[in-house]
Image (tube, helix red, strand yellow):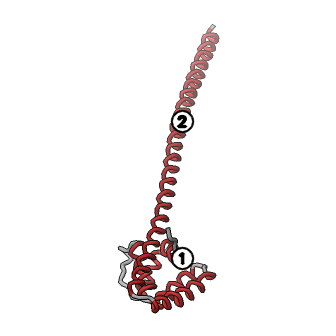
Amino acid sequence: MEKLTPINQKITDFIYSKPDVVVVLLQQAGYNIDLKTATLQQINKIVYGALYINKDETFAKLLDNAIANDGENNFVVAIVSSIISGVIGGVFAAKEGDKQRELIKQVELSKLAMTEKLTEEKIRAEQETARVNILANSLLEYRKTLQVESTARLKDTWLYVTGLGVGLGVLYGVYLIGSDI
């Protein structure tokens, strides 16, 4: 199976981690996409279409700046130079059919990467849910045990207080009987 190029992997990772930022960038570059209804697949298709088909330098620069603001300055230069020179140069030299096939390939590879990331997130969420359920069950069991012990201690306290009262009553009764004689 073919993998994404390192540059496309960085773009896909950025789309996955900051899809809201990418939608705003697309809107700034003039693409029609709604932030409330956007999906990762839709964002991928528009981003790769802007880079490979439309040769949109404005969007490429906006995307570069957004990635640079996240502190990934080391590969930003490589992305910009590679995207601008490689993609634009390659697009001019390629036929329209080759461009479409490349776009479809990149979008599908990006979708596979997104699906993999979403599956990992689902597994993490299920593990966290299981962990929370175990903790909740543990807390419930602890509460039950604490209540049983509290009830037992309360019974013991009432028995002690009752015994003490009976004992004092007997002593007082003996004292009263002994004082009349």
Q: What amino acid type is highlighted by mark number 1? A: Thr
Which marked residue is nearer to the observer: mark 1 or mark 2? 1
Q: Residue furthest top?
A: 181
Badge 2: residue crowd in 10 Å (few <14, some 14–19, many ≥20) = few
Please state the horizontal and vertical placement of residue 21, each as a whole percent of the image.
Answer: 47, 79
Q: Which residue bears the numbered disc 2? A: 145
Badge 1: residue crowd in 10 Å (few <14, some 14–19, many ≥20) = few
Above-or-below relation of 137 to 65: above
For label 2, the SS is helix
State which quadrant residue 171 falls in: top right
Please state the horizontal and vertical placement of residue 115, each as a whole percent of the image.
Answer: 45, 65
Residue at image point 46% right, 75% down:
19
Please state the horizontal and vertical placement of residue 49, each as a whole percent of the image.
Answer: 41, 83
The disc at residue 131 is: none
The C terminus - image quarter? top right
Q: Which residue bears the numbered disc 1? A: 5
Above-or-below relation of 76 to 155: below
Please state the horizontal and vertical placement of residue 142, each as a whole percent of the image.
Answer: 54, 40
State which quadrant residue 149 falls in: top right
Number of labels in the image equals 2
Above-or-below relation of 100 to 17: below
Q: What amino acid type is highlighted by mark number 2? A: Thr
For label 1, the SS is loop
Q: Give how far apart the Cα atoms at labels 1 and 2 are.
A: 58 Å
